Image: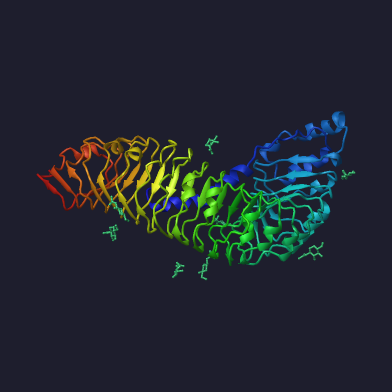
Amino acid sequence: MTTPHGVRAYCFVIVLVACILHHRVATQPPPAAGEAALLLEFKRAWGDPPALRAWSTATAASAAGAHCRWPLSSLTYLDISSNYIDGTFPVAVYSCRSLQYLDLSYNYIGGELPRDIGRGLGVNLSTLALGSNEFNGAIPKSLSRLRNLRHLDLHKNRLTGTIQAELGELPILEKLDLSHNPFNAGQLPVSFKNLTNLVSLEMENCSLVGDFPSYVVKMPGLEDLHLAHNSFTGTIPSEIWSLKKLQFLDVCANNLTGDVVVDGFAAMSLLTISAAENKLTGMIPEVFGRLSNLKLLILFNNNFSGEIPVNIGRLPSLMVLSLASNRLTGTLPSELGKHSVNLSAVSVGDNKLTGRIPKWLCAGGQLKYLFASRNRLNGSIPVSLANCGTLVELILDDNELSGEVPEALWTARELLGVLIRNNSFTGSLPAMMSNNLIVLDIGNNQFVGKIPTVAPGLTHFFAGNNHFSGEIPSQIGYGMPLLQRLNLANNKLSGNIG
Ligand SMILES: *[C@@H]1O[C@H](CO)[C@@H](O)[C@H](O)[C@H]1NC(C)=O
Ligand SMILES: *[C@@H]1O[C@H](CO)[C@@H](O)[C@H](O)[C@H]1NC(C)=O
Ligand SMILES: *[C@@H]1O[C@H](CO)[C@@H](O)[C@H](O)[C@H]1NC(C)=O
Ligand SMILES: *[C@@H]1O[C@H](CO)[C@@H](O)[C@H](O)[C@H]1NC(C)=O
Ligand SMILES: *[C@@H]1O[C@H](CO)[C@@H](O)[C@H](O)[C@H]1NC(C)=O
Ligand SMILES: *[C@@H]1O[C@H](CO)[C@@H](O)[C@H](O)[C@H]1NC(C)=O
Ligand SMILES: *[C@@H]1O[C@H](CO)[C@@H](O)[C@H](O)[C@H]1NC(C)=O
Ligand SMILES: *[C@@H]1O[C@H](CO)[C@@H](O)[C@H](O)[C@H]1NC(C)=O
């Protein structure tokens, strides 16, 4: 848990959040009116799931008899998402000619999608949500016949084959989500450039290759663009930064190259920029520092160079700044945290940063993670950081930091891990450490004084190459009952360890 790799999770956090948002609570209209036979056919096709137990022959028959005033051919809205329904696609639903909204997502429905699905479903269908099921085989071409389709969601199934060019013929499509399907490696169809009404394009983890689909810059309503975890090459088109409505841009884990060039910056709605794990070069664009809504700036594992724009330190909405593993130079913006009341994670390890740790990082009272390993930071740990009650992990190993570590740090209540090895820190540890601390690595420093006697949660304690003195506490096994690894080599300890 305390490895610097923890920050990689942010590339996935976005995925998670997206999934949670998709997983909206179903407002299920009761099957008030219906043809008994049709209801029972659905039920059989889905293997009599417990969720539909109420649809017994008797209730269905009585609904069809006494109370049935409309046949299901008037049904416009059917949402059976988030149940335990299995079986195959219920072609019985073809009888619902007026259907506008069909949501079967988050179930266990499998098999191939029927080839004639686009002819079978009513032409007024505007939402087809089949995400998070077990559908396999290819996307049926006939879907393009659903001329009124606005939302098509097939995410997280087992769809294979190539992505059908015919999908580009859906004239008013606004949301398309094909994420997380094991498609054959291939390019996005060129026909997608005709989907100019798109608001949301989610193509994460779809085995896509080829150049970044630059035609997205001609989709003026685009808010969400998710292309992460593919093999796109080429550069990010400079005009993308002129999309006024763009909120989420996630292109992480591709093979994108070149500088991030900004042309006519107008994307002031951006909430998330995630371009981590590519081969991007050049400077981090200065204009990112003007995005007053930006919460997540995720650029780790690239080849960015130059200094971090000073205004990034003044972004009012910033929550996560992840710039690790680049070639950044200069200092951390000195005001970082001062204006960002929700700043909770800063990850800048493996760069060439110099200068001090900004003293405002926890000014908003939200900072949980500071990862800055392997830079050339100097100066000391600010008292304000040691006093940060929300801090969970502090990772500053392999820098040129010095000075006395403020005592408050050792009793910070939320703190689970402190890795500050290989600096020039001085100071001493209290006899009793925080209950929650699990990993403490302070090796290769200049700590003095005695080894603590009580650290109830500590499993890893590395304090070699310091100036600790006195005896190793004879009760260490009681004071640190969870200890798995202990390194006290190269100190001035004495006594016996019986
Ligand atoms: C489809 O929508 C149109 C326009 O709203 C409507 O006139 C027509 O009756 C609908 N078709 C069906 C089968 O409900
Ligand atoms: C990509 O999708 C496959 C299923 O097609 C899934 O097993 C895998 O975990 C996904 N990878 C990522 C990075 O989400
Ligand atoms: C885009 O739409 C136009 C007009 O409908 C059509 O002529 C063209 O072939 C379409 N382009 C692609 C690549 O499908
Ligand atoms: C990027 O390209 C390299 C070399 O061409 C390849 O080995 C790697 O798998 C690619 N990565 C992705 C995410 O496509
Ligand atoms: C980063 O960029 C430098 C100079 O442009 C280049 O020499 C180096 O190979 C690049 N590193 C990676 C990992 O792409
Ligand atoms: C900070 O977070 C809170 C809670 O999520 C939110 O209500 C508030 O708008 C955020 N403030 C800023 C400046 O983004
Ligand atoms: C930190 O490093 C900078 C140069 O990178 C130097 O000017 C400054 O004096 C150093 N400060 C301390 C406290 O060592
Ligand atoms: C200690 O950190 C310095 C950078 O401050 C680095 O050059 C050196 O390799 C590190 N030493 C060890 C033993 O990790």
Left or right? Give the position of 297 relative to 222.
left
Left or right? Give the position of 459 relative to 323.
left
Image spot of residue 271 (x, y percent): 58, 46
Task: Between residue 379 and residue 61, name the one nearer to us.
Answer: 379
Image spot of residue 54 (x, y percent): 72, 33
Above or below 364: residue 419: below
Left or right? Give the position of 31 relative to 306.
right
Above or below 168: residue 426: above
Above or below 455: residue 202: below
Residue 399 sits in quarter: bottom left
Query: Which quarter shows the C terminus?
Result: top left
Task: Between residue 44 and residue 230, name the one nearer to us.
Answer: 230
Image spot of residue 431 (x, y percent): 21, 36
Furthest-top residue in view? 66
In this rendering, the count of numbered labels is 0
Image spot of residue 331 (x, y percent): 39, 53
* Residue at figure coordinates x 37%, y 48% from the top left: 2
Q: Is residue 147 visible?
A: yes
Q: How is the image coloured?
A: rainbow
Task: Between residue 209 and residue 67, name the one nearer to us.
Answer: 209
Q: Is residue 255 visible?
A: no
* Residue at figure coordinates x 81%, y 53% from the top left: 146
* Residue at figure coordinates x 55%, y 48% from the top left: 290
Above or below 451: residue 352: below
